[in-house]
Image (cartoon, rainbow, N blue to C red):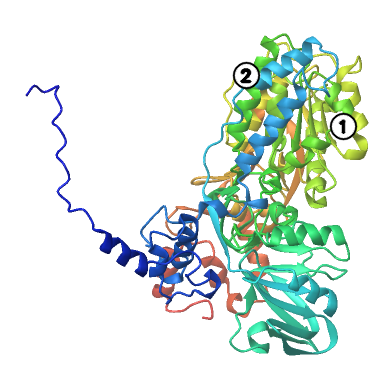
Amino acid sequence: MSSDEKPEREPSKEAPRDESSKDELSENEVSDEDVSTLDSLGPDSDYGDFLSRVVSPKLRRAALRKLFSSAKFNVLDGLDDYAEDYSRHAPLGDLVPAEMRARLAAAASRAINEPSSAMAPASTANHEARAAALSSLTGLEVTPTSVVELSSAGRLLVIGEREAALQAAARMPADFACMVFTPGPRAPKVNELGDNTIITGGQAEISGWLGEFEISILSDGLTLRLAELRPGTKAGTDLVLDLSDRPCMREQMTPLGYFHVGNDPQALEQALEELVELRGSFEKPKFFNLDSSICAHGQKGLEGCSRCIDACPTEAIFSLGDSVQVNPNLCQGGGICATTCPTGAMTYALPQAGDLATYIRRLLATYGELGGTAPCIVFHDERSASAMPAALEQAGNLLPVVLEESGSVGMDTWLTCLAYGARAVFVRVGPETPELITMELVHQAAVARALLEGLGYDPRMLQIVRPESDEDLSWCSDDRLPEASLTALASFDALSDKRTALKLALMHLVEQAPQRPDEIALPAEAAFGAVQVDSDKCTLCMSCVAVCPTSALKAGGQLPTLSFREWNCVQCGLCENACPEDAIALRARFLTDHELRDSRRVLHEEEAVHCIGCGEPLATRSMLDNLARKLQGNPMFQSEEAFRRLQMCGDCRVRDMMRGGSGPLG
């Protein structure tokens, strides 16, 4: 037989059933009418009847589905990565990664600017160049950052009047454990109502974040923790719904998991929708990086710069004495800490300043190559993407850059944009922008505008724009836009190091400036300036050098000399606080001469006084004279011999005392 031929099928060897066998099977089998109803079946019921040949397939499948829905058939293997129910994933809500939101907002912004958009005006060369430039760029490429893990078990505290709070708690799913707190003047009492615990009396004090809220009750001058009121209860809760008129948490940016709705029904509905999704494990980006080695907050117990602490709307930053620390669970990416940090110790991580500057440089270059003119950069957060005013959208030369938060970009990025060829830079803040962020942006802009105006540029090249002042943008597309002052665009690479980026941008702007005075006076607390030393008071004790975090002040080695490099100075005030003679004062300014800014100069020097014993350099004459004045009247230094030893080094002083057999008291 060839390989193509198929063998004939052999007849079945199974013996045919006789008629008596058929009759016997028919008597034993049951039909749909004979089986039990599905409602009466339980995990231990006999499902054998449903396997009969004469039971309809539909009924058999329904019975088997009920059988295998039993818990004993649904024990998942913990090692099976694919055993989860991926059809019921929890929406990320406010915890959507910032990069994803930025990309979506950028895509929406590009769609708005497409010439085919219904909102787009009649096409102009600038509109076409902008649309093409935004479409050609793949988006802002960011250096990855680490994540912060949060976990919520669904424990919810509802604060408010009893009836309203109970109604809100009743609307939560059954897998949420709800507790109700009703403030009042009396001592707190704990009651149980169904599945809810009710605490009445006292005032709530709340701290923490999603999954880790700490709850304390204040009453009659005492602070009671939740576990003390209800033994066996954890001290905190995962989520807080605040229905009271005044919020229990007063931060300008309250932490994730806390919802203050007051008496607003619409806000309550939105909060309830979000709360039901906040059960489980979540991740959010770590928005900051901190280099404590260059932090100017403190040294040797003295306080210096506290700009980041003062500006943080979440109160996530606190002092550790010589440096600061950030609680990543509280941080929500406002970014103003990085904007206000004078040394660059605190930097924004999503995106890093270098990544953002690289994107802007490519955007400006592509826009220009496609025929666009007079480009203006407008920074805004994603909340403003749909609220950009019509006048803004009609300006084809306005290039939008979407950020996680408007406060995350500062002077280094603004001036870099101008050096790369932007005719103007706008930072748009909205009604939801915390006032602390807006105030610090305004202060930073005041410093930058003083620099621009001092160099002869139009100060309107940089503006902080509020929603009520969007008309300030109207001049960016008409004849009032200042003429381009830069004859050449900057070619330096985008950098994430703040002080280096500032230096390069300022050097370029100074070189191209219409005017160049010797120095430009700046507003107080600017991060540029001089240290002035009163030579009549300074003893060259070098206390200022010991605390300077940026090495702006240095000692002269073996010589009693105090030198200063102005570019390094961030006006933190540590040297001023450390000086025991009150001989130091700060002066905010900017020197336009790069050589003067970057070179060291002597602030004060004296000839050294040498040890009268061995001749080695000992101190300055002013230091010894000052020491002698302070020791007058001290009973330990009433003899001429004791004062003579002040002019000796430590070794010679000991030898002299051993030879003379007496100390200062002798």
Q: Which residue is mark 1?
A: 389
Nearer the observer, 639 or 81: 81
Q: Which residue is mark 2?
A: 136
Residue sticking out furthest to the front: 19
Q: Amino acid at mark 1?
A: Pro
Give the position of the N terminus as an image quadrant: top left
Residue 184's place in the image compared with 147, above or below, is: below
Badge 2 local density, few (<14 within 10 Å), some, or many (20+)? few
Q: Quadrant of residue 279?
A: bottom right
* Residue drawn at point x = 93 percent, y = 39 percent: 468
* Residue drawn at point x = 70 percent, y = 48 percent: 334
Residue 359's place in the image compared with 103, above or below, is: above
* Residue drawn at point x = 8 percent, y = 21 percent: 2
Residue 576's place in the image compared with 142, above or below, is: below
3D distance between C-alphas at marks 1 and 2: 25 Å
Q: Quadrant of residue 12?
A: top left
> Secondary structure beneath disc 2?
helix
Nearer the observer, 88 or 13: 13
- Decide if residue 94 is on the left or right side of residue 463: left
Nearer the observer, 297 or 324: 324
Residue 297's place in the image compared with 143, above or below, is: below
